[in-house]
Amino acid sequence: MPKLSKPNNPFAVPIKNYFEILTTTLKLGTTSFGGPIAHIGYFHEEYVRKRKWIDESAFADLLALCQFLPGPASSKLGIGIGMLRAGVWGGLISWLGFTLPSALALFFFAFFLQGHDIGSAGLVHGLKIVAVAIVSQAILGMGKNLTPDRTRMSIAVAAMTVVLLWKAAMGQVVVIVAAGLLGPILYGKAGNAGDLHFHPRVNRTFGAVCVVSFFLLLALLPALRHLTSNHWVVILDSFYRSGSLVFGGGHVVLPLLAKEVIPTGWISNEHFLAGYAAAQAVPGPLFTFATYLGAMMDGMRGAVLATVSIFLPGYLLIAGALPFWDILRRNSVLQASLTCINAAVVGILLAALYNPIWTTAISSPLDFVLAVLLFVMLVFWKLPPWIIVAAGAFGGAIISAVV
């Protein structure tokens, strides 16, 4: 009796696909300057136009999913494309290749700062002023897209007010939750969704495990932190929670991390803002700012733990949501909640622009002049971020020499 041939396994992946993903993402991680919006352009050129791994419609659907979920949009997009190409391991390899170059660069920057003890030098002062210009640009762009009407602008201002005046550690979380609950009341109606244009290589069982794991870690890590006070658990909880609550863009991680690492004394205001500015000068995801913070706190072990912790929520969410995206995108309640959450995070970022960024960086008319010049160079001259960072560091050194 002839043997029956086995049906094709939709989850089977050729080994060469893993190697292709690694080499492609390493190249993108080394060359993708300009922040999350620019990264999406690089991904489109590489994956849709050049390699044709996915088509235009699938790219658009996946991008919508990544913008819907909390976490770093460009990193989730890369992970999602890796999963569509080569399943769960493909997503992990895609994340590693895109993240490693900037993580290494920021690790060595932290090593440089520690080794040279230049916490009060002009270089660091200039980088703090760079942060003023970069966050101002982020707020301008996000404000246009996420607060286009009176209602959402009002939500942003209310969120800013609460975060600035209420100093509780959970203030930002409360603001995000409140905005999510307000969403269905104000924006309850949603349009009809069309057909889905991609077929995930992630089955629903694994997706469900990832979603459950995401929420379990989010709930249990703070409790474990309280019970044990273990240093490594504290770091894991702080960075995991920060990575879980970033809506609207990678820049929003700034106020979340500032609340975690500055009041605890893990890192000074000066070194925090210097690292944030340096993160703008390197290619790849902005979330590798966590690598710098971890390295400043605990060297190599801290860098690895902080990096994995802050990206883990995004990986769990994209792996968990891919098989269920066709259901999620048709849910009007979730869509309405996200509308108000995105408006609230604009306010959270606006509060961070004032404290700690403005209050730490701008202390003289010369500082303000340099900040305005850098903002104009970034927004109107369209100069790349690494030039802004270099100009800010040079300008800070001049200001320190003059004053």
Image (spheres, rainbow, N blue to C red):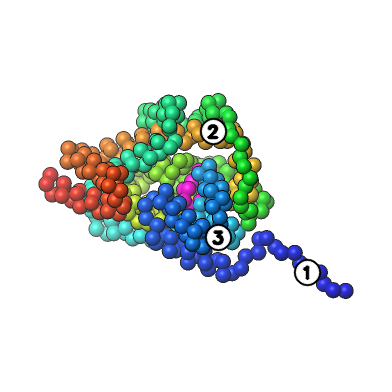
Judged from this view, the residue extending furthest toward the right is 1
Say which mark, if any, is on residue 5.
1
The image quadrant that residue 332 belongs to is top right
Mark 3 belongs to which amino acid? Answer: Trp
Q: Nearer the viewer, residue 207 or 35?
A: 35
Q: Give the range drawn in magenta.
A: 69-76
> From mark 3 to mark 1, how far is it between C-alphas?
28 Å
Say which mark, if any, is on residue 31.
none
Is 327 left, or right, of 344 in this rendering?
right
Report x, y in % for residue 243. Answer: 47, 46
Disc 1 on helix, strand or loop?
Answer: loop
Disc 3 on helix, strand or loop?
Answer: loop
Residue sitting at 45 percent across and 41 percent down?
248
Q: Tell whether position 167 is magenta.
A: no
Residue sitting at 32 percent across and 47 percent down?
272
Judged from this view, the residue extending furthest toward the left is 402
Which callout, 1 or 2, points to the residue nearer the camera? 1
Q: Mark 3 points at which residue?
A: 53
Q: Is residue 364 above or below residue 7?
A: above
Residue sitting at 56 percent across and 57 percent down?
54
Q: Name the residue under label 2.
A: 337
State yes or no: discs 2 and 3 in contact (Cβ < 8 Å).
no
